[in-house]
Image: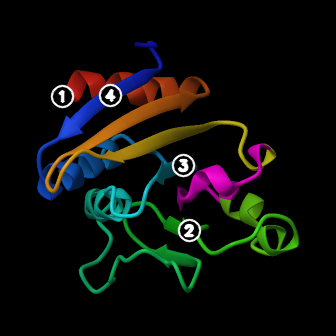
Amino acid sequence: MNASEYHITTGSPEETRALGRALAGRLRGGEILGLSGDLGSGKTCFVHGLAEGLEVGGNSWVRSPTFTLINEYEGRLPVVHVDLFRVAPGPEMEDLHLEEYFASGSVCVVEWFERLDAAGAQEFMGVHFRYVDEERRALRFAAHGRRYGELVAALKEAR
């Protein structure tokens, strides 16, 4: 296993949310988290935990922004939650102006990150989700940049 990667299998949705909360406690703002994986593999469940860990208010309904494309939440740090599932590459993707969000200092969480042009984010943490069975999900955290390497190392130590 690469030193800048961390693999873990969660045993329940609560464990997946707890992993999101654990990561949230280590964020400082300005991070980009690129989530990938099939439908139902746990991406939005993880984002729920991340939002809880970032103290997003209970009045905020954290959900996958499949139809709204981008949801913004206030918490200890501002959170931008993007879903690219229904976005076509090219002009439609460019119209989202994601680079402005990436430079905003918010924690940017992008579901279906693999649909984003590689030039859209130079440094980020990739989180790949794989459905194992009804309860378990395999997650792979991969650092792309020094700051993200530190986050991966911190997650390994915390588990």
Q: Do the residues labelled 1 and 4 touch (CB within 8 Å)?
A: no
**Left or right side of 16 for 1:** right
To which quarter of the image does residue 92 belong?
bottom right
Q: Do the residues labelled 3 and 1 touch (CB within 8 Å)?
A: no
Could you tell me which secondary element the residue under label 3 belongs to?
Answer: strand
Q: Do the residues labelled 3 and 2 touch (CB within 8 Å)?
A: no
Work out which residue is located at the far right of the displayed protein and give it. Answer: 91
To which quarter of the image does residue 25 belong?
top left
Q: How far apart are marks 3 and 1 (CA)?
A: 21 Å
Instruction: Name the foreground residue: 91 vs 61.
Output: 91
Determine which of the numbered discs, if any, sits on residue 7 in the image.
4
Determine which of the numbered discs, if any, sits on residue 34 in the image.
3
Q: In which quarter of the image is the N terminus?
A: top left
For badge 3, the amino acid type reads: Gly
Residue 124 lies, with reference to residue 159, above or below; the image says below
Residue count near mark 4 (Cα–Cα under 10 Å), binned few <14, some 14–19, many ≥20: some
Determine which of the numbered discs, if any, sits on residue 159 in the image.
1
Q: Earlier in the sequence, mark 3 or mark 2?
A: 3
Residue 30 lies, with reference to residue 112, above or below; the image says above
Q: Earlier in the sequence, mark 3 or mark 1?
A: 3
